[in-house]
């Protein structure tokens, strides 16, 4: 027996798209199967995410065959629309935030989604909706994730939808957390990885450009994340370039950990930590500007040789060593660093401090090459935006290493020119700087 129910779908009775804030739309439920009335008859190039050997979900380019409907569902109780009466609404009630997550059946997302749903990220009075991007291969696993979210009874989680179509998942997204990426397999050159993942992020950029919120904030986690973020940015010209981030917060957290251990203090005593450049082994953990208990690191840790050599190498290679020890990539700590990265943008930066994130370099105050995604020190007033920190110092050692990671990113940019609309690709990567988790 078919029943007609009112839901927060993005489809209208006539087939025209509605805003997610539209009070009414229709979804036909036939027994346990839900069919969405299609928004349009357009054909869309789709992106799939499959489960990778190292437990990070790997997207693949995918085109829906003609006549085959895309697989989109809300899940369980999340298909019900809660009609809040005026006396149910509190003064602190806020509008839903749409959060899209790719690679949503992978291990990183498995840690992250529950942090988002609990209110840990956006606050205890902020309701959210989660839109999860999966693949045909991982769709049952994605349903399992939705079941766990349902069973966790999070009061702030008002809606969950799952789909294999980025154009559906990214619809009206205020935040897009792009986790899924293909890891480097045996014998694969880094240039090949740049091309394969670059195609995925080009398509995701196009989808974001067409259907996401005009001011969507995009955090790219899938490696090589700096160049993937640049590709995504170049394919989304309607979204401000400033809104694209490459995740380097895990590197910052690792650097703080090593400095705290060396100085014999707790982690919260370390501040002003910058990761410059690429999320690769050329990244530059900046001990020159960092502080411990408000004092320059070099005054607390006077072993400069340790700082230049052992400290720097430990941070650069931490991810690879973790894989050797544990046999898997750093899923839990990566999820924590994504939370940290978001919270750094939605809460005011403590006075005098800053945080690291990979952002667009055009008009940067440091003299770093323009038109790449480069990790730099930033501050935020808590509105999701940021500004680059100007009161930093450089010495010859720091600047030399910044130029090295800059050269690597410029080479990666040339290698994906065919995906950024800048002509034919030319790969002349200076060396094979293995990214943690690529193998």
Image: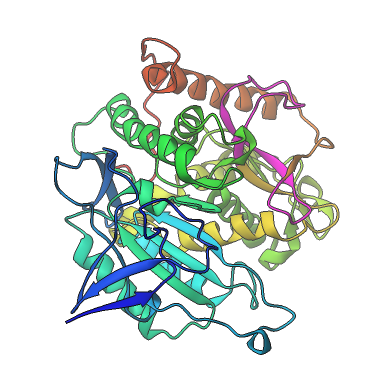
**Any magenta on residue 370?**
yes
Q: Position of residue 134 (x, y in %)?
A: 28, 56
Task: Name the one closer to the observer, 4 or 75.
Answer: 4
Image: 156 above or below 210: below
In the image, residue 21 above or below residue 171: below
Pick the quarter of the image with the C terminus.
Answer: top left
When asked about the image quadrant of residue 202, the answer is: top left
Q: Position of residue 228 (x, y in %)?
A: 43, 34
Asked if residue 31 lies left or right of residue 406, the reply is: left
Name which residue lies at 22% across and 40% down. Answer: 62
- Res. 280 in view: no
**Rendering colour mode:** rainbow
* x then y, percent, for residue 114: 45, 73
Q: For this view, does 3 lie left or right of residue 390? A: left
Q: Which residue is drawn at 54% across and 58% down?
A: 337
Q: Which segment did they paint magenta?
A: 358-385
In reply to whether residue 379 is colored magenta, the answer given is yes
In the image, residue 138 sits, relative to residue 124, either above or below, namely above
Q: Which residue lies furthest to the bottom in this view?
A: 87
- Closer to us: 21 or 258: 21
Q: Residue at x 57, y 67 (%)?
A: 96
Task: State the count of labels.
Answer: 0
Q: Quadrant of residue 206?
A: top left
């Amino acid at each position: 027996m078919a029943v007609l129910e009112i839901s927060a779908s993005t489809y209208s009775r006539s087939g025209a798209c509605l805003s997610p804030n539209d009070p009414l739309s229709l979804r036909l439920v036939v027994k346990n199967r839900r069919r969405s009335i299609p928004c349009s008859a357009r054909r869309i190039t789709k992106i799939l995410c499959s489960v990778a050997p190292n437990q990070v979900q790997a997207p693949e380019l995918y085109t829906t065959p003609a006549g085959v409907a895309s697989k989109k569902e809300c899940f369980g109780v999340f298909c019900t629309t809660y009609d809040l009466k005026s006396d149910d609404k509190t003064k602190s009630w806020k509008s839903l935030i749409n959060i899209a997550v790719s690679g949503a059946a992978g291990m990183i997302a498995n840690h992250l989604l529950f942090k988002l749903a609990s209110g840990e990220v956006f606050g205890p009075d902020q309701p959210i909706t989660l839109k999860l991007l999966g693949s045909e291969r991982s769709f049952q696993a994605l349903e399992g994730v939705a079941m766990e979210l349902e069973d966790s009874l999070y009061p702030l989680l008002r809606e969950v939808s799952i789909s294999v179509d980025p154009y559906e998942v990214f619809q009206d997204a205020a935040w897009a957390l792009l986790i899924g990426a293909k890891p480097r397999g045996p014998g694969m050159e880094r240039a090949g990885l740049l091309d394969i993942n670059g195609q995925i992020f080009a398509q995701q950029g196009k989808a974001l450009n067409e259907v996401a919120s005009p001011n969507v904030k995009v955090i790219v986690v899938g490696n090589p994340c700096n160049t993937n973020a640049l590709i995504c940015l170049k394919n989304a010209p309607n979204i401000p370039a400033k809104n694209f981030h490459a995740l380097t917060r895990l590197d910052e957290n690792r650097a703080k950990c090593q400095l705290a251990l060396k100085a014999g203090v707790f982690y919260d005593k370390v501040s002003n930590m910058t990761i410059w450049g690429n999320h690769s082994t050329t990244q530059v953990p900046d001990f020159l500007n960092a502080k411990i208990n408000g004092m320059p690191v070099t005054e607390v840790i006077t072993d400069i040789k340790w700082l230049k050599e052992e400290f720097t190498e430990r941070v650069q290679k931490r991810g690879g060593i973790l894989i050797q020890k544990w046999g898997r990539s750093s899923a839990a700590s990566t999820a924590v660093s994504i939370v940290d990265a978001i919270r750094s943008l939605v809460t005011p930066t403590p006075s005098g401090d800053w945080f690291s994130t990979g952002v667009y370099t055009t008009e940067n105050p440091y003299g770093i090459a323009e038109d790449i995604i480069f990790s730099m020190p930033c501050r935020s007033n808590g509105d999701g935006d940021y500004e680059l920190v100007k009161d930093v110092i450089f010495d010859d050692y720091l600047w030399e290493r910044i130029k090295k990671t800059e050269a690597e990113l410029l080479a990666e940019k040339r290698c994906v020119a065919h995906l950024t609309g800048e002509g034919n690709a030319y790969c002349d990567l200076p060396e094979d700087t293995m990214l943690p988790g690529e193998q």
